[in-house]
Image (cartoon, coloured by chain):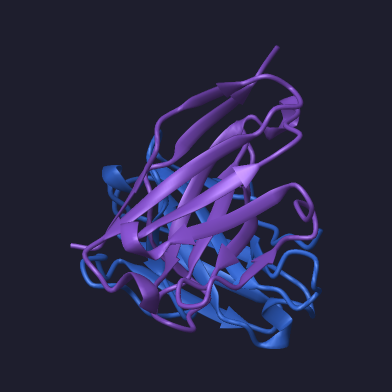
């Protein structure tokens, strides 16, 4: 079955960077884009950006532009999301999610989520 | 940042019908972009419930239905069950070039 498995929880200090991985299985990796979405405690979801798994092209939310980098390793069927210059407001659960079908604007499935805690 | 607005909470007794609204703007729902709905149980990742305004993925019970009109959309649960107690979020595409994909503020459904 289609599955996205993310790396484990992270604790980082303000100003540091974090890199979260998302390993895909159960489908042809290069056929579908992968998105990153985060959810701060008690808040709604925020879309951060996405990567075209075929050519590596990316698009980011204006809010995170300059701080977020999404990359992929096709040989490992894995997508990475790196967020830099962390601040306390970046404490959230970070999810990767696949576009349901090529060209779709909805997300299915989602990874299990990775809690990133930013604290001194 | 564009956002879709939902009521914070709705509730109903088992077997009742509840409806969750999702109000957008001319840069997202009103521009004709599809609305999708997700269910999030406590401590878990979201699950796609409705895509393309009205479509249910395989395995989603038919008591869940969606609709869209103008700058708004709705999710209806007909025949509410205890396991439907969860948070529900709408989502759409946005052409304002700030976020591209926007989510609703979320609605907590409580089964009385």
Furthest-top residue in this view: A120
Q: Quadrant for the C terminus of chain B, please.
A: top left
Look at the image and tell me whether residue B104 can be seen: no
Residue B99 in picture, x, y percent from top left: 73, 64
Residue B100 in picture, x, y percent from top left: 69, 70
Q: Report which quarter residue B16 is drawn in.
A: bottom left
State the count of labels: 0
Furthest-left residue in this view: A1
Left or right: B49 with respect to B11? left
Rendered position, A96 above or below A28: above
Q: Quadrant for the N terminus of chain B, please.
A: bottom right
Rendered position, B90 above or below A115: below
Residue A18 in picture, x, y percent from top left: 59, 34
Q: Colour of chain A?
A: purple
Depth order, front residue of B105/B63: B105
Furthest-bottom residue in this view: B32
Residue A88 in picture, x, y percent from top left: 73, 25
Left or right: A79 with respect to B16? right
Depth order, front residue of B55/B43: B43
Depth order, front residue of A52/B64: A52
Look at the image and tell me whether residue A78 can be seen: yes
Question: Which chain did the image draw in blue?
Answer: B
At horizontal 75% and vertical 51% (from top left) the residue drawn is A64
Q: Report which quarter residue B73 is drawn in.
A: bottom right
């Amino acid at each position: 079955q289609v599955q996205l498995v993310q790396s484990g929880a992270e604790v980082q200090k303000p100003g540091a960077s974090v890199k979260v991985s998302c390993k895909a299985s159960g489908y042809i990796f290069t056929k579908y884009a992968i998105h990153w979405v985060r959810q701060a405690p008690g808040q709604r979801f925020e879309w951060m950006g996405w990567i075209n798994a075929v050519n590596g092209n990316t698009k980011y939310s204006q809010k995170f532009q300059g701080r977020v980098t999404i990359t992929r390793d096709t040989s490992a069927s894995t997508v990475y999301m790196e967020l830099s210059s962390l601040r306390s407001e970046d404490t959230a659960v970070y999810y990767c999610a696949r576009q349901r079908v090529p060209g779709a604007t909805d997300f299915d499935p989602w990874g299990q989520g990775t809690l990133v805690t930013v604290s001194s | 940042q564009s956002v879709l607005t939902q009521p914070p909470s709705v509730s109903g007794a088992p077997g009742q019908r509840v409806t969750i609204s999702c109000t957008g703007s001319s840069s997202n729902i009103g521009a004709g972009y599809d609305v999708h709905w997700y269910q999030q149980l406590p401590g878990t990742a979201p699950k796609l419930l409705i895509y393309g305004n009205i479509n249910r993925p395989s395995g989603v019970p038919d008591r869940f239905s969606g609709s869209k009109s103008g700058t708004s959309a709705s999710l209806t649960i007909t025949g509410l069950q205890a396991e439907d107690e969860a948070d529900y979020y709408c989502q759409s595409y946005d052409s304002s070039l700030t976020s591209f994909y926007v989510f609703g503020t979320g609605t907590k459904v409580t089964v009385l």
